[in-house]
Image: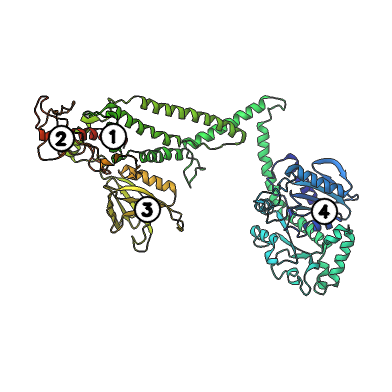
Amino acid sequence: MDSLITIVNKLQDAFTSLGVHMQLDLPQIAVVGGQSAGKSSVLENFVGKDFLPRGSGIVTRRPLILQLINGVTEYGEFLHIKGKKFSSFDEIRKEIEDETDRVTGSNKGISNIPINLRVYSPHVLNLTLIDLPGLTKVAIGDQPVDIEQQIKQMIFQFIRKETCLILAVTPANTDLANSDALKLAKEVDPQGVRTIGVITKLDLMDEGTDARDILENKLLPLRRGYIGVVNRSQKDIEGRKDIHQALAAERKFFLSHPSYRHMADRLGTPYLQRVLNQQLTNHIRDTLPGLRDKLQKQMLTLEKEVEEFKHFQPGDASIKTKAMLQMIQQLQSDFERTIEGSGSALVNTNELSGGAKINRIFHERLRFEIVKMACDEKELRREISFAIRNIHGIRVGLFTPDMAFEAIVKRQIALLKETVIKMSRYPRLREETDRIITTHVRQREHSCKEQILLLIDFELAYMDTNHEDFIGFANAQNKSENANKTGTRQLGNQVIRKGHMVIQNLGIMKGGSRPYWFVLTSESISWYKDEDEKEKKFMLPLDGLKLRDIEQGFMSMSRRVTFALFSPDGRNVYKDYKQLELSCETVEDVESWKASFLRAGVYPEKQETQENGDESSLGGRNPPLPPSTGRPAPAIPNRPGGGAPPLPGGRPGGSLPPPMLPSRVSGAVGGAIVQQSGANRYVPESMRGQVNQAVGQAAINELSNAFSSRFK
């Protein structure tokens, strides 16, 4: 059975030489412990020579696979320097340091690439150990701040395998409950089946104390028990005390100590070496059947792969090209499947990905972002009024200038740039191929942006008022009159969305905030106790409501995303509450609900900008009245239905017709103006001011209605 260890050593060397990850979990022993726990001294006692690097801070920075082989001559060999025998163990130490620095540098960094060292000696038993870096708490020098986590990940990479025995080294002068080695072993081996405890520095314990209960496996029991050893002190190491003398002193210590005398034959380095040899041999024998089955399965897989390459010649330059083309085709297929979607078993069931996420952005997020920039009617009226007055200058105008229309529309179209440019996220793919493809995608992204911005520039260059999407004054009035006559709505009271949300208003429901089942229609939002929709709690009409985001306070413990429904005129939305606060678990859910509310005609709140200057005379952002000119008011062209009687006297400002486009958000919008029945008809002096006021108001309403219906 001793030859099993040699066979496993050859397999380890083969995997390391090929530079591939071992897919076979070979039986091995990993040495785990904190800094200055005595790991290096235990390993050197096995060999009987000083050959491991020493110093302050972290010394072992790469895994050292130490293969001890019983032989006649005493020398060492490194796998990375084949054929060279190191008879001097000082040279072995220097080679370990140089090889470590070659990979990790001299800044105390770590690497999981192992160093394979084979030691032949007549004083050793066949044994293979993996010396891992000691646990550290604080980064020193140029070490990364997460050095502790990096070391733990490296250790777990070895000890989490079921075929790995764990040699947990703990100094006796520290509390066993605080042992880093036992803590790590407990995480991967909670039953203590694979863990072997080693207690070092028994000679350094305080007088009157001992580790008898630990060594007798009574305190923190392990299936394989504990073994105590006494290593050389720092003074002995600096004085180059011979290890054989140290082993003799260790034996004398156990035989003379009253607490350890009765178990001296089960303590010490020689006994530990024999136990590890026996444990590793038995462990290999126990895991051999499973290892054999796994090897046979992998051999069959590899033979099939080799069969596919039997026609390839090693010197054929086209092999690399064919392999690269196959990889590119596979990558293209995976990319298309991710974007287009597939019904495979590998589909993500936890969250949206690939094409589904893009679809959601275009149909929900993008639409909502565009609507958030839709013009506010009051602000639009104010801008139109300023534009008309600024274009007329000192003159008193009667007709609406085209330049005012173009100036306002250009500003609204230009607002689309900000939203369009947000669509610029592309994931990284794979290493070098990732870099090439991502660069290509980004180049296409730049061209896409140029084309979109060019399209916006086209729209800015010429306003096509004859387009079918442009409502205009006459069509807007006809649509408004038809809507008033029929009383029909576009959507009807259809269900738009259903789902769970939480009402955040404290006290709005008994028991505080809690989840409900919400049903959103085109006219109202209702909430029920559960999905059965049997017990309705409340129904809230949506007329006149808007949306706003709610920021969580500094002291808030909730991680939910909150928004609110409120009335712009300040009325209560529900009972005594000015707003109804709703929340979801994620931002994506909130954005999706906002898009649904948008379909129901509930728009987000607009931030009104404040203008400085001497325009306060507009009073509540109402447009100014044109002064009386003493001239008769001309007819407005393209007025359907011919002329209309003049405004009756005694009614300032006149009475405007109902709005052209009914709006849930903004109330009455727009109106009609009165056309004089004849161009030369005399208008009484008392009517001139009223007619001029009606003309100016109607011009502003005309533009306002066109913009509102175009950009909402």
Above or below for 60 versus 447 = below
Which marked residue is nearer to the observer: mark 4 or mark 2?
2
Above or below for 327 versus 64 = above
**Residue at label 4?**
126
Q: Please tell me which residue is depicted at 70% across the width and 66% down the height of the picture.
A: 176
Looking at the picture, the colour scheme in use is rainbow
Amino acid at dot 3: Leu
Which marked residue is nearer to the observer: mark 3 or mark 2?
2
**Residue at label 3?**
582
Which marked residue is nearer to the observer: mark 2 or mark 1?
2
Amino acid at dot 4: Asn
Amino acid at dot 1: Ile
Callout 3 crowding tier (Cα within 10 Å): few <14, some 14–19, many ≥20: many
Image quadrant of residue 668? top left
Nearer the N terminus, badge 2 or badge 1? 1
* Residue 479 appears in view: no
Gap between marks 4 and 3 measured at Cα = 69 Å
In the rendered structure, the answer to whether residue 582 lies left or right of residue 345 reads left
Callout 2 crowding tier (Cα within 10 Å): few <14, some 14–19, many ≥20: some
Q: Quadrant of the N terminus?
A: bottom right
Callout 4 crowding tier (Cα within 10 Å): few <14, some 14–19, many ≥20: many
Q: Please tell me which residue is depicted at 33% across the width and 55% down the height of the picture.
A: 532
What percent of the width, then of the height, locates residue 203?
A: 81, 68
Which marked residue is nearer to the observer: mark 4 or mark 3?
3
Amino acid at dot 2: Gly
**Residue at label 1?**
384
